[in-house]
Image (cartoon, rainbow, N blue to C red):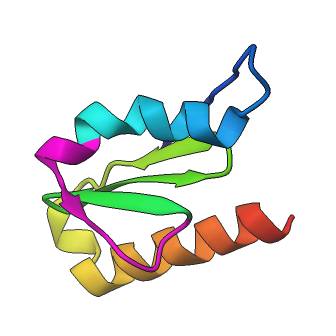
Amino acid sequence: MAHYVATSRRGKVPKAASEELAPVGKALRPLPGVGDEAYLWDRNVLFRVSNLVVGIIVLPRARSTDDQVRTFAADLANRLRNG
């Protein structure tokens, strides 16, 4: 798992993070219900909560089901949002 905290000189930090995801989001499938916006690539998840962008890479494949990965991502996004 990796994360990136977007910053902006204009004060609209969540918008800056969303702009960082925009090019990637065009190539990936949207994943509703995870954070402020989320995308799915194979079984990997990339999502945003405010100005925090989180990437979850799933390895090895046989250990986690797709539903487990999505549940983990949604739970993590909710925990980040609610502190």
Residue 62 image offset from top left, x and y in percent:
16, 70
Residue 18 in the image: above or below residue 20: below
Task: Decide if residue 64 is on the left or right side of residue 5.
Answer: left
Please give the name of the residue rendered at 49% of the width and 41% of the height, measured from the top-left corner: 18
Quarter of image, res 51: top right
Please give the name of the residue rendered at 59% of the width and 77% of the height, measured from the top-left corner: 75
Highlighted range, magenta: 25-35
Residue 3 image offset from top left, x and y in percent:
56, 36
Quadrant position of the C terminus in the picture = bottom right
Residue 7 in the image: above or below residue 48: above
> Is 29 covered by the magenta stretch?
yes
Task: Decide if residue 29 is on the left or right side of residue 23.
Answer: left
Please give the name of the residue rendered at 67% of the width and 73% of the height, measured from the top-left corner: 78
Extreme residue in the front direction: 10
Q: Is residue 19 visible?
A: yes
Residue 64 in the image: above or below residue 10: below
Residue placed most toward the observer, 32 or 4:
32
Residue placed most toward the observer, 42 or 12:
12
